[in-house]
Image (spheres, rainbow, N blue to C red):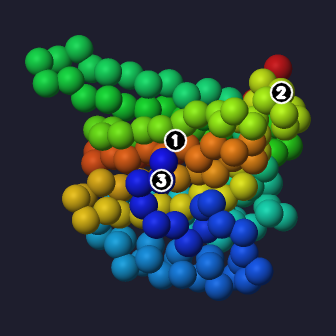
Amino acid sequence: MAVAEYHLVGHEHADHASALVAAMRRLATNRARMPAALYELMTAAWHYDPSDRRALHDMRVRSILVRESATPEPTISIELTLLGAYYDRELRMTYGDVRRYELGLPACAEQLPPAGSHGDVLEDEVVVLDNGNVVHAIELSRGPILEIAFRGGFSWTWADVTS
């Protein structure tokens, strides 16, 4: 269940460019309320350019690692690794102080190829909620939307894929 209203995620667009402009405008408006590294990733010129090998479009989920700290006041962090569309690189994103996350495969996913996959990244978008949570939503082609709501730090890095 979506925790926010999205311009890109979960929508078919006759005019994708207008939806992207609206999402970018919302990012700029909320820049001070999100980690600088997240803003940098989301506004990179290559991010939404499907002709660029670094674009998230068509990447696949490689792994999702959820960690809960063993402290008196535990916190959750998530490391999400996406495999590049050309299988030559990974994008690793780490979210700190995670407040909520959701990922599931709908029942209809069993009928869609390829079996055993979340599918390709179609869109991703960031929204800052009134309660201060930053939500990174990633729509996948097999139906699920991965949503990570967090308040802590964010980092991302590239890694080459070696066999």
Q: Few, some or many C-alpha atoms within 10 Å of disc 1 (few <14, some 14-19, many ≥20)?
A: some
Residue in the image at 37% along x and 79% along y: 29
Type of amino acid at the residue the image marks with label 1: Met
Q: CA distance from mark 3 to mark 2?
A: 24 Å
Type of amino acid at the residue the image marks with label 3: Ala
Q: CA distance from mark 1 to mark 3?
A: 21 Å
Residue in the image at 52% along x and 41% along y: 93
As helix, strand or loop, the secondary structure at mark 1 comes to strand
Residue 70 position (above or below residue 38): above
Number of labels in the image equals 3
Residue in the image at 32% along x and 29% along y: 76
Q: Are marks 1 and 3 in contact (CB under 8 Å)?
A: no
Dividing the image into 4 quarters, which one contains the C terminus? top right
- Residue 54 visible in this rendered orientation of the protein: no
Q: Are marks 1 and 2 in contact (CB under 8 Å)?
A: no
* Residue on which disc 3 sits: 2
Q: Can you tell which mark lies on residue 115?
A: 2
Type of amino acid at the residue the image marks with label 2: Ala
User: Which residue extends farthest left?
Assistant: 72
Q: Few, some or many C-alpha atoms within 10 Å of disc 3 (few <14, some 14-19, many ≥20)?
A: few
The image quadrant that residue 71 belongs to is top left
Q: Position of residue 152 (x, y in %)?
A: 29, 45
As helix, strand or loop, the secondary structure at mark 2 comes to loop
Q: Can you tell which mark lies on residue 74?
A: none
Q: Few, some or many C-alpha atoms within 10 Å of disc 2 (few <14, some 14-19, many ≥20)?
A: few
Residue 59 position (above or below residue 51): above
Q: Earlier in the sequence, mark 3 or mark 2?
A: 3
The image quadrant that residue 67 belongs to is top left
* Residue on which disc 1 sits: 93
